[in-house]
Amino acid sequence: MDTESVKTPGRKDDQGKLQWSLLPIESVEQEIKVLMAGADRYGAYNWQLVDNAIERYTNAIFRHAAEIQKGNIFDEDGFRHSAHIACCAHFLEWLYIYNLRKATHETPEQRCGGTNANPKS
């Protein structure tokens, strides 16, 4: 095909697909650093095993937010409290998804966007 003679733009059917470019990579990098420090301290994925995790990570979000309100930007580990809040929020979202899947016995097809999946997941 002679691409020089083509006058119309190429086609890419990506409407309705996730726009990962909207996620600010700089803040995600900070969250990953917090996660890596947590993995060194507690073990990778330990956060998934915490008893009463939803309550405890919600409390952690408020503790970190209170520190920011007091003017303390950095936690004792050297990372910003806001990065810890973001990690805890991701933990909560994962826990809600995980618990919903357990409660509804969601199938792999539904998780991957099958016909019965929630379109906003």
Image (cartoon, rainbow, N blue to C red):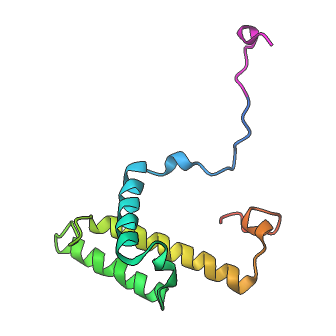
Q: Is residue 56 above or below residue 88?
A: below
Q: Quadrant of the C terminus?
A: bottom right
Residue sitting nearer the eye, 110 or 37: 37
Which residue is rendered at x = 55% and y = 73% of the image? 94
In the depicted view, which residue is nearer to us: 107 or 38?
38
* Place of residue 44 in the rendered image (x, y in percent of width and height, measured from the top left): 46, 72
Q: How many marks?
A: 0
Task: Using the image, determine if residue 11 lies above or below residue 36.
Answer: above
Q: Is residue 14 left or right of residue 1?
A: left
* Residue 115 in the figure: left or right of residue 34: right
Q: Residue at x 39, y 64 (%)?
A: 36
Give the residue displayed 70% in from the left and 23% down from the top.
9
Q: Residue at x 36, y 70 (%)?
A: 40
Against 12, residue 36 (above or below) is: below
What range is drawn magenta here?
1-10
> For the view shown, which residue lies furthest in the bottom direction?
52
Position in image of residue 80 (x %, y %): 26, 64
Magenta span includes 19: no
Predominant secondary structure in magenta? loop
Q: Residue furthest right?
A: 115
Which x, y percent locates residue 99? 62, 83
Q: Which quadrant is home to the N terminus?
A: top right
* Displayed quadrant of residue 31: bottom left
Is 7 covered by the magenta stretch?
yes
Outermost left residue: 71
Relative image position of residue 22 (x, y in whole percent): 50, 48
In this view of the protein, which residue sits in the foreground, 5 or 2? 2
Residue 2 shown left or right of residue 121 in the figure: right
Vertical comparison of 24 with 47: above or below? above
**Residue 88 sits in which quadrant?**
bottom left
